[in-house]
């Protein structure tokens, strides 16, 4: 005959419920983290990040699904962090000087977009729209702060990889400004630089510190 719950202290009962939940939920959490880690390992932006740091990053990301033509965010929105495409494709759009909308690029599996917002309080420079049924990994500034506390070395490796990635973009922007390009073309160059950010192995020599 089961004992009445009133015989168990509240804290003991809560701990028992929590242990049971963890046993039931852990398999699905492990599968999510393995899938996320596999995607991150194939992402050029993070190719220099050690495997242990990638596992910590996989624990921190959030999986989100968007339907075809659904918007992830709009140009001018406050940015909270970056996305990595896990499956599907995301169309990045921007408004040109004459008011017309142009496509910067499409991001496919293993590609990163919206990353500038992870490192500062920046407005979105483009509109992101799912071109197909799409699943992404989201990593946002609160997640980075938590990661800095729990896994400081892993967080430093991730930030350094992103800083290197953004430095390559900056080179492209400076070159475009020198050529006198228009706003839409400048954004296209920035996004094009993102596709090549995994090439090379040079270091920028410093990481970004949290302010």
Image (cartoon, rainbow, N blue to C red):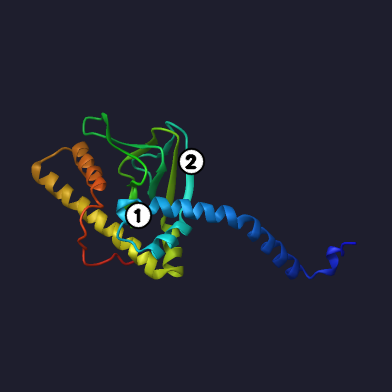
**In the rendering, which numbered label is found on residue 94?**
none
Q: Nearer the viewer, residue 185 or 111?
A: 111
Q: Residues within 10 Å of mark 1 (few under 14, many from 20)?
A: few
Q: Residue at x 43, y 48 (%)?
A: 137
Cα distance between the residues tagged 2 and 1:
25 Å
The percent position of residue 73, horizontal first and vertical second, equals: 40, 41
Quick one: SS at disc 2? strand
Of the 4 image quadrants, the one containing the C terminus is: bottom left
Q: Quadrant of the N terminus?
A: bottom right
Left or right of 26, for residue 138: left
Disc 2 packing (10 Å; few <14; some 14–19; many ≥20) = some
Give coordinates of residue 75: x percent, y percent.
Answer: 34, 40
Tell me residue 62's x, y (percent): 48, 51
Residue extending farthest to the left is 179
Rendered residue at 31%/67% (across/down):
209
Q: Which residue is mark 1?
A: 121
Left or right, residue 148 beside residue 106: right
Q: Residue at x 38, y 65 (%)?
A: 155
Q: Quadrant of residue 176?
A: top left
Q: Earlier in the sequence, mark 2 or mark 1?
A: 2
Residue 124, horizontal then vertical, whole percent = 33, 45
Q: Residue at x 43, y 45 (%)?
A: 136
Residue position marked by numbered label 2 in the rendering: 65
Residue 19 seen in render:
yes
Say if residue 211 shows up in the picture: no
């Amino acid at each position: 005959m089961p004992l009445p719950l009133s015989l168990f202290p509240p804290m003991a009962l809560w701990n028992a419920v929590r242990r049971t939940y963890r046993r039931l939920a852990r398999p699905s959490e492990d599968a999510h983290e393995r899938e996320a880690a596999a995607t991150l390992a194939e992402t050029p932006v993070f190719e220099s990040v050690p495997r242990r740091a990638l596992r910590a990053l996989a624990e921190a990301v959030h999986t989100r699904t968007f339907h075809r033509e659904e918007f992830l965010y709009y140009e001018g929105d406050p940015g909270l962090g970056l996305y990595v495409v896990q499956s599907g494709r995301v169309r990045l759009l921007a408004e040109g000087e004459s008011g017309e909308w142009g496509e910067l690029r499409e991001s496919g599996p293993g590609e990163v977009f919206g990353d500038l917002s992870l490192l500062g309080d920046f407005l979105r420079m483009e509109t992101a729209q799912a071109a197909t049924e799409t699943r992404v990994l989201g990593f946002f500034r609160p997640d980075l702060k938590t990661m800095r506390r729990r896994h400081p070395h892993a967080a430093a490796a991730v930030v350094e990889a992103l800083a290197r990635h953004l430095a390559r973009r900056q080179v492209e922007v400076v070159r475009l400004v020198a050529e006198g390009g228009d706003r839409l073309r400048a954004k296209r160059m920035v996004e094009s630089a993102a596709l090549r950010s995994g090439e090379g192995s040079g270091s920028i020599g410093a990481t970004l510190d949290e302010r």
